[in-house]
Amino acid sequence: MELMMAKEHLYTLIKVATEEDIRAQIGTTTHFDLVNYDSIKVHRVKKQTPFQDFKAQIAEELGIPVVLQRYWVWAKRINKTTRPNRPLTAVEEAQTVQQLKDSHMKMPLTELRLFLEAPILREDLKQLSPSLPERNRGDILIFFKLYDPEKETLQYVGSLYVRLSYRPNEVMRHINRLAGFPEDQPIKLFEEIKFDPNVMCEAIDKKLTLKGSQLEDGDIICFQKELPLGAASAHRFPEVPAFMENVVNRQVVHFRKLEKPSAPYFDLELSKELTYLDAISALAAHMGLDNPAKLRLSPHNVHTHMPRVAPFKYATSDKLYDMLRGNTPYSDILYYEVLDIPLPDLEKLKTLNVVFANSKVEEVASHQIRIPRTGTVSDLLVELRKKVELSRPDAELRVVEVITSKISKVLPPGDKISDQCWKIRAEEVPTEEVDAGPNDRLLHVYHFRRDKLNKDQAILFGNPFLLVVREGETMAEVKARIKAKLGTKDGEFDTWKFAHVTNKASPEYIKDDEVVLTRFPSVVSIFEAEFLGMEHADMGPQRARIREPERRGHETDTDPDPESKPNHEPDAEAGLKPDHKLGSDSDGGSAGKPWLTANPGIVNGAWLDELRVFWESNSGLQSVPVIPDEKSRELLQRFLSDKRGQLRLARTHIKSLGCGELRRRCAALRLRGWRIGWRTPLLWGLHLDERGSCRCCGQVAGITMCRLPQKSACGGRI
């Protein structure tokens, strides 16, 4: 092999296409032009070989005598098609193969491509015609393809020399012979002009001469039987142009069920030019559904290999090609779901995933509640009462938003509720809260453990809850009520420690005889900057986590093999569908607060190992967490799910800023060693390794930055 490669420069590569090659390819592997040279045999011929000797070699291989061989050179036209242009002259055939190649092929590494015209093989005599067709002045070589609208097939039937001065009617009988039709069969002729970027296949005017129709050597005419009047409607593609358009635009789409994206799927051959309504109608017909409007389609994410977050809107103006392409590399996968109501009606509603917690703060059920787009919390509670079993019919209900094992807000009944909340939890209001006195306080109570590397930091876990603490009540009395509320066993509860926790100082333990409310003298914000913490071991499997960035860099408390252990989530334990939102509501904030560890959830079926929402006052970045837009969500998913080693991500979102403020904040980032480019809104994504060290930053929502000296492995640019 090495010896052959060393002598490769001594050879010329030649590919010779015949009419048999064209006949074998048209209608099977290709429909346009004449031949795909990738499938043609390569001849390795020494450069100094006379072309006449090469013709003798072809005569031996194909059984075509040298005197019956006529070779044509190909030419690439302006419209990107490639056609036989002219036959070789006697002078050219007297050259060596290398001289012939150099005179026609401009690129030194390309092969010489030729078309071999030979006499027609007579099937009845199994022998070649005695001579080549004469080529007279004013004659052109035309290639013919036959289209059958009933079978929807296209095939090559041969070539003819025709006079430019002829009109189509004068050559009809010769064309019919190629197809095996009666000589008087009415046929319709179309010139195949080009197919890229758009198909151009025009009917030939029978009143004009072939010269008037601007035909020349190498042109292709597609023909078919003329259809009887009114018969066109019986065919999907009644004429050649419609069939050619379908060939260019047809697309095999793999339809997968949204609920089971990895399950076996079925394929449908559709046109890329179909509208959304046409596509769901074809899908409904295949599935046997009466109402296509009950189908909803979702695009494929080529990075996560799962459905994208946002499904298509009903009657979107996109065509099938746009739906498959989207904002990502082209895909041939769509996901479908069958709804219980038509999609136009569903889009007028807001679907909320609500978990219901019992008196022990156990999330016992998960419900999908539909309310009007303008619906409020009260509307949600009306629908929820129909689905849950209450301790008493007149029990008061409330709705809270839970973020990272923390109650971010209690949603007032009259407020509009967003379907972009992190987790919506509904629960009964205990009677002790209803009967609370004016000096009693409603405290946030959270489970926490100490960070192994930073003992001053509290790591939250489990289900948070609200507890009314009465005036003058000691810690021992509150502990007794908490134990009864949670139903914790004696031996386990005895190890629990209770502390006053803020975001500015280490947890301060509270003694049993101490009055609890003396630690909570002021009214806290809605984001609850302080809380009553219950310190105890988290008995569930621990996930690798990322610590708050400090001036000395990024550190992490990692599990040796975080991927080998399942995520510890109350949702998973209770058999509920975990929360899947990537953002939080922007109404509340807490500048300078430590990192918040987000509950991992399912985003279209892919587990998110860690998602950190933070802001850093030291660098001038003080913004509240907001829900990223759809594009940002897709890019976040790409970083989170592309590889298991890229599951550590931090992001901050700066809402629309003035140019001066944006430059100031980006300058602050540069002082920290970042090279940065931006556009608003700004989304900052950090790619961290297993140790928590920052390795690189990829491009996320228009921002590119990298702290490495070279281009990063995951696509970030300096």
Image (cartoon, rainbow, N blue to C red):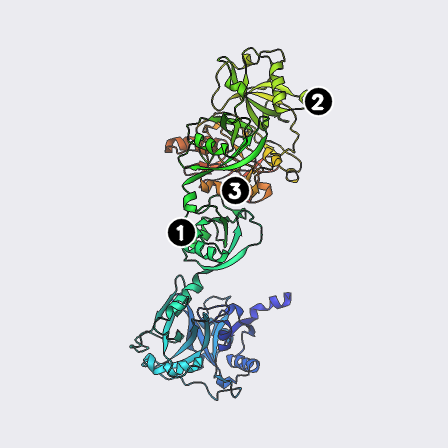
- Say which of marks 3 and 1 sits in front: 1
In the depicted view, which residue is nearer to us: 345 or 605? 345
User: Label 2, on which residue?
Assistant: 491
Q: Is residue 252 above or below residue 141?
A: above
Q: Is residue 455 above or below residue 20?
A: above
Amino acid type, residue under disc 1 in the picture: Asp
Mark 2: give few (<14), some (14-19) or many (20+) Cα within 10 Å. Answer: few
Task: Find the distance from the CA under tag 3 to the CA under tag 2.
Answer: 43 Å
Q: Is residue 319 above or below residue 57?
A: above
User: Label 1, on which residue?
Assistant: 318
Amino acid type, residue under disc 3 in the picture: Gln
Q: Secondary structure at mark 2?
A: helix
Q: Secondary structure at mark 1?
A: loop
User: Label 3, on which residue?
Assistant: 637
Amino acid type, residue under disc 2 in the picture: Gly
In the depicted view, which residue is nearer to us: 323 or 380? 380
Mark 3: give few (<14), some (14-19) or many (20+) Cα within 10 Å. Answer: many
Where residue 1 appears, as percent x and y from the top left, is 64, 66
